[in-house]
Image: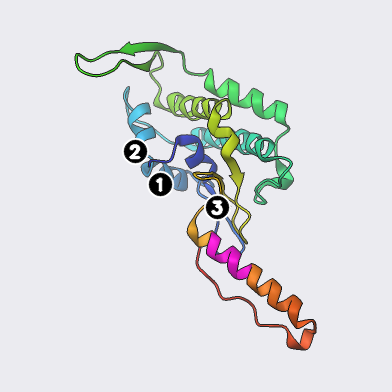
Amino acid sequence: MTERPVMALASTIRHDGDGGVLDDLETVRGARRWLQHQPGILATVTATGDLVLDEELREAVVDVRRAVRALFARVVSPAPPSPADAHRLLPVDEAMRLLNAAAAREPVAPQLRWPAEGPPTAGLLSAEGDPGVRLVAALARDAVDFLSGPQREHLRACRAPRCVRYFVKSHGRQEWCKPSCGNRARVARHYERARAAAGSPGLRPSAPPSTGR
């Protein structure tokens, strides 16, 4: 299943596997590389011309991400938010203003599509010719749709060691964003239990092995 734009955007803040945090949007070059791996978004926003991703556009996309991650933190509360930016989250009111303003940058109108064979579907007709504006607005609109929809109730911050991702639960017992995080969490729990059982610093087990990212 293709990851929806808002989750792909939030996941541009990720762990490096060694306790650090990586930002895929830290530079213009990184932002371009990330966007090249989002064919669905690109197909939508470049319908009216070529997209030029410069520093101004990178900052606009990062602003949407800041708003999204602040509101994600509100969704998962009272559970802890992602530790990657828990110390510098935007106030909720400011995050909502920023997100709504970004979504409003592109004037769109709903359009009905009904093929001769098949059910009717709805789409959006844009009056905006700038692909950069379309990109920012599309990301913001998807965030608004997610945050006001039923998937919001299944949003979680992964609690595996070193992980900083948000994810949407796909089944009731899911605790981590991906299997490797589950493996790492189980290893860490086993290590903590073994250390507690040892009871003495001289008998403590060695650190758990790495289980990958």
Q: Nearer the viewer, residue 7 or 107?
A: 7
Q: Are marks 1 and 2 in contact (CB under 8 Å)?
A: no
Question: Please, what is the three-letter code of the amino acid marked with disc 1?
Answer: Arg
**Horizontal side, residue 21 vs residue 130: left or right:** right
Question: Please, what is the three-letter code of the amino acid marked with disc 2?
Answer: Pro
- Examine the image and state in which quarter residue 69 appears: top right
Mark 2 Cα shell of 10 Å, populated few (<14), some (14-19), many (≥20): few
**Horizontal side, residue 135 vs residue 61: left or right:** left
What whole-number distance in Å separates the C-alpha atoms at marks 1 and 2? 12 Å
- Residue topped by disc 3: 14
Give the percent coordinates (x, y) of residue 43.
Answer: 32, 31
Secondary element under disc 1, as helix, strand or loop, is helix
Give the percent coordinates (x, y) of residue 35.
Answer: 41, 41
Question: Please, what is the three-letter code of the amino acid marked with disc 3?
Answer: Arg
Q: Which residues are magenta?
A: 182-188
What secondary structure do most residues of the magenta stretch adopt?
helix
Q: Is residue 130 visible?
A: yes
Secondary element under disc 3, as helix, strand or loop, is strand
- Residue topped by disc 2: 39
Q: Nearer the viewer, residue 94 or 173?
A: 173
**Horizontal side, residue 36 vs residue 167: left or right:** left
Q: Residue at the location (59% across, 56% down)?
A: 163
Give the percent coordinates (x, y) of residue 23.
Answer: 55, 50
N-terminal-most mark, 1 or 3: 3
- Residue topped by disc 1: 33
Q: Residue at the location (58% across, 29% down)?
A: 147
Q: Nearer the viewer, mark 1 or mark 2?
A: 2
Mark 1 Cα shell of 10 Å, populated few (<14), some (14-19), many (≥20): few
N-terminal-most mark, 1 or 2: 1
